[in-house]
Image: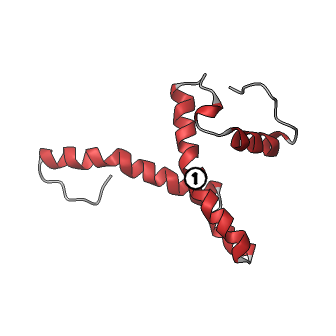
Amino acid sequence: MTSLLVEAFEQVSTVWSGTPAHWAIEVYFFVLKQGCQIDRLQGLETEERELPALALYPSVAWRVPVALKLGRTCPDVDCKAIFESCEWQAGYLVAHRCTPPTSRLR
């Protein structure tokens, strides 16, 4: 659905070609708002706490949809295709509450 006026077939293709980019932007902001809960930053109270979060959250919000799409299209890809070792190890530590394995993850 769109709010754009479409009166000719040529306009349909123009509106349709913009849809994937629009959807990617929607997913980005959904992850930023719901996954990262960026609206809770005000609760961090100090600039020293807010600035690192503001630097990290956009990167996370961009990588989550990329990782999901890559995982669906190439399920055997190594996580290091998207994340540095320190990044995936930190995520593993938070999710599993134990030291990450030294071998490669898939």
Q: Is residue 106 above or below residue 52?
A: above
The residue shown at (64%, 54%) is 35
How many numbered callouts? 1
Q: Secondary structure at mark 1?
A: helix
Front-lying residue, 18 or 97: 97
Q: Is residue 48 above or below residue 73?
A: below
The residue shown at (67%, 63%) is 53
How far across and down, in percent of the image, does residue 97 sit? 86, 42
The residue shown at (65%, 61%) is 37
Q: How is the image coloured?
A: secondary structure
Q: Is residue 13 above or below residue 4?
A: above
Identify which amino acid the numbered label 1 is placed on.
Ser
Left or right: 29 in relation to 23: right
How far across and down, in percent of the image, does residue 96 sit? 83, 39
How far across and down, in percent of the image, does residue 9 sit? 13, 44
- Label 1 CA crowd tier, 10 Å (few <14, some 14–19, many 20+): few
The residue shown at (37%, 48%) is 21
Q: Residue furthest top?
A: 76
Quadrant of the rendered image containing residue 67: top right
How far across and down, in percent of the image, does residue 65 sit? 54, 43
Left or right: 66 in relation to 22: right
Residue corresponding to mark 1: 59
> In which quadrant is the C terminus drawn?
top right
Left or right: 104 in relation to 67: right
